[in-house]
Amino acid sequence: MMDYLIKNARVVDGTGAPAYTADVAITGDRISKIGTIDEPCAHTIDAAGRVLMPGIIDPHSHADAGIFHPDWCHQRIVQGITTEITGHCGPSPAPNCPEHMELLRRIYFDLTNTGAPFDWPFCDFDGWLKAVEQQKLSANYGFMVGHGTLRACVMGGKTQRASAAEIEAMQKLLDEALRQGALGLGLGLSMFPGSYADTQEIVELAKVVKAHDAIIVAHRRDEGNTAYESIEEMLTVARATGVRMNIAHIKVTGSSNWGKGRALLKLVEDGLREGLDLSLDAYPYIAGYTQLFQIFPIGVWGVGSEQMMRAFSDAAYRADVIAKMNDGTYGGLKAANGGAAGVQIIQCPDPAFDKKTLQEISDMLGVDPVEAAIEMMERFGSNLMMFYYLQNLDELKELLLYPHTMIMSDGAPTNAHNHPRWMGAFGQIFEMFVQNGHQLTLEEAVKKMTSMPAARYRLAERGVIREGNRADLIVLDWAHFENNCTYEHPAGPSKGIDYVFLNGEIAARDGRYTGGGQGTVFRGR
């Protein structure tokens, strides 16, 4: 007996194949039949004029930061995001250890600046997954284990090369996490403490990942001046071990580097021809979203915000950092589009400065832009956020359109003004490439956000509308779809997402979460 019947839908099945008209039945948590279905069903949705597509799989988000927050944890289901793959860019809540707990929590919560840290009543990865499984989840979740976390567990805050014994200790922790359900290893090689690992350390850890047939997701060392070399390093790891490798948030940052994108794609393409198991992901915005302090090099902020601000109170040190920022020795500000004009302060408590560029604030305060950045952190706290405009739009589009690029958000929750990617990344693809640019068909765009990440992360029975698969589905009023997520007004929700099914139940209707909480946790093999 059917639980739901969706009639007369234009089925975009997630494979990239042309759409077709059909009825789709749901029984339990499965798609039970596709075709012409004449049997009566108490819960029938007439989807004439609507698109039926698989639920969106975000292969790279930081939604784990909001799992335990009552406002954040259910925000994105209304956008049709039914699966979140998280634990990227270096830190994860597990494994952890009492002797380094303060450091571990700092590197985890500093990554997303959630503003609402949660308790960690667990030590190993199994404990972390069980804590998540106890929640009322409005999406399915899969988790990476963070390389930065492994390093901090073993080495604390040390910045030297890991010894053989330390690498072996990291391998043991990694092996245990993968056995307990981690989907793979998340690298954060421009973040603290991952930036201090050499290539050999990553190779040795990759051997463990390969033994589990898991995946490495690489936030590489640099996306600007040494973007090419940073991808080469990841290909070296893949070549040495045969590990599956995804290069995260592929981009080219800094106007002096624009034009390198095609060379990066050729490097990846050559690796694929060689037989390496590679993929990419990207989000469709030229601006990143992070703490203002990240305009400075990691040597300035990697020590932690309190120590960083104490260091800035020393006049000689402060002057030296400002000089190096201005002469290009430290290139973070020069990388922004238009320099200080490409850094926009977000979430400032003082409305006089909120949403102003660093150049505008510099003019308001009558000081150098770098000095203005330091003064803003002194006034309003070191976790002051920014939109960081770094990319060229045409080059970004070329990277997104590459056949092996999946769509992701890189989004994280917040109660304050967010980046539109949190709610709007996938709608932005529809708007940018299907509705306006006409560079992708709807079928091609849906494939990049459904079956591609499902296959890459080995999520069986997800990402494709097929009999027997899990019923994670979106009923989309495509003719009236509007993204409704912008830098100025990022919260959405999008218009036209009529129904979202999660594991066979209606999880959202007309932009509202229904409260079902039927999401599940994936455990790696």
Image (cartoon, rainbow, N blue to C red):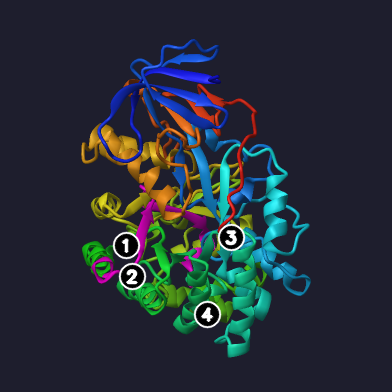
**Lower position in the chain sequence, tag 1 or tag 4:** 4
Q: Earlier in the sequence, mark 3 or mark 2?
A: 3
User: Label 1: how many residues lie within 10 Å, few (<14), some (14-19) or many (20+)?
Assistant: many
Amino acid under disc 3: Ala
Q: Quadrant of residue 512?
A: top right
Which label is found at residue 252?
1
Instruction: Answer whether residue 291 is magenta in the image.
Output: yes
- Position of residue 519 relative to residue 313, above or below, is above
- 3 or 4: mark nearer the eye: 3
Mark 3 residue crowding within 10 angstroms, few (<14) / some (14–19) / many (20+): many
Instruction: Name the N-terminal-most of marks 1 and 3.
Output: 3
Q: Are marks 2 and 1 in contact (CB under 8 Å)?
A: yes
Relative to 156, does residue 519 appear above or below in the rendering?
A: above
First reached walking from the N terminus: tag 3 or tag 4:
3
Count how many numbered circles sit on residues in the image.
4
Residue at 41% x, 42% y is: 425
Query: Does 224 lie within the magenta span?
Result: no
**Cα gap from disc 3 to disc 2, whole angstroms:** 28 Å
Q: What residue type is disc 2 on? A: Ala
Q: CA distance from mark 1 to mark 3?
A: 30 Å
Q: Name the residue carrying label 2.
A: 227
> Which residue is the site of mark 4?
196
